[in-house]
Image (tube, rainbow, N blue to C red):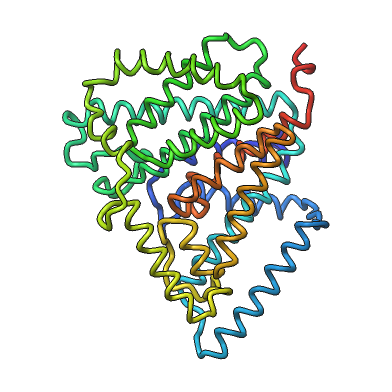
Amino acid sequence: MLNARNSNKILMLTIVSVFWIGYPLFLGQRIVDVVIFITFLFCVWGGRKIHFVRGWPLSLFLLLCSYFILTWYLNFVIGKVPSVAGFYLFSKILFICLFVFIVFTYMKTLSVEEYRKFVVILLFIFLGLCSWAIFYVLFYDSFFVEWHPRPSFPFIKDTRLSDAHLLAAYFAISLIFFSENLGKFFKRMPFWLLPILLCFGAVAIIATGSRIALAIVLFWILIKALRQPAFLVKVGFISLCFILVFFLFVKGAGFEYQLDRLFSFSFEETSSLGKRVVRFLEVFRESGEYYYLFGKSLLYADVFYFDGILSFLLANFGIIGPVVFAFGLVFVSYCFLLTGRSDSLLLGAVLVSLLASEFFLISRFMVPVVFYFYISRYGHSHNINSAQK
């Protein structure tokens, strides 16, 4: 008989299995968003107890409530009213918080074997999406000539557009996750599997032509080498393998456009980097209306995407937002250097990825990232290797 626990587990596995499908059903919502909402209803229907948080999460919540009250008063004084975009933005963030709560509620009840199932599914999806990105570039002239030259998540509605930067960030963070955790859950894994996996993922990153993935990988190498200098030896070995793969399979195979874009760092106003800088400066000038400190607040936002977390935070939270973001990145990096926890490393990589865009608003990004985080956290807090003996 299908009890509440099994039905919830099936829904969680479904969320993991369908997050990559990019086709919108209604109002920009994907299949995974619908499944997350159904899972929440099952959570409420099943009578799950909600454990109220204490300590710093409660303090953070009270601080945010104080901020919303203050910004509401400031906007009320200058005669502004909440916007439709602001309500949608607020509800989207609330939905993501809801999903994190659902994962927290159910993942902590799973066994090691059940965690391994999630790792296997996530690994196969990662390999499938890598294969898709590489296939897209190799056979672009044959099958996708009317589409955007850079690959996206499969089944997007408008093929003239691309979310390659989102796909690339997912690839880079996935490489970090599997590199740090695959050996914990599968002790007898062949030694050659991880280098091949990393090379395969690196080729997929090149296929996206996205610089944010390069920044994430460089962050990983730098922060890991600072804690474990011997890691540079592994990086050198994997780099040699990648160079071999590159010259055998990538060079001259249609990756010229992607390579050129990947290693171009122009700050002209027409380039993507230049547009982000211009947008940030525009937002900074506009934030003077709110004394540079508080921002417009989420409910009063008139722009949904700024294509960069710093502009998003500055517009909605004032100068305090980017400062807190920078402090958070430094803090989680320090935590990793101090403890070596892979969940701290992943969180730092996610913060770096947000420099490209507000990926935290997109379920195709947040679903795998949240699962990666909780699986990494479980792998650190439980002696998995001893359970395999």
Compared to residue 268, the image places residue 115 above or below, namely above
Q: Nearer the viewer, residue 2 or 123?
A: 123
In the rendered image, residue 155, in percent from the top left (x then y), is placed at: 35, 41
Residue at 53 percent of width and 73 percent of height:
295
- Relative placement, left or right, of 284 versus 349 is left
Query: Residue at the location (43% across, 69% down)?
Result: 283
Figure check: 290 above or below 198: below
- Residues 143 and 12: in front is 143
Q: Write down the quadrant of residue 371 in the picture.
A: top right
Residue placed most toward the observer, 175 or 242? 242
**Quarter of the image that includes the C terminus:** top right
Q: Is residue 182 left or right of residue 251?
A: right
Residue at the spot 70% in from the left edge and 31% down from the top edge: 340
Residue 325 in the image, given as x and y percentages of width and height: 59, 56
- Indicate the quadrant where residue 74 lies: bottom right
Considering the image in quadrants, where does the N terminus appear?
top right
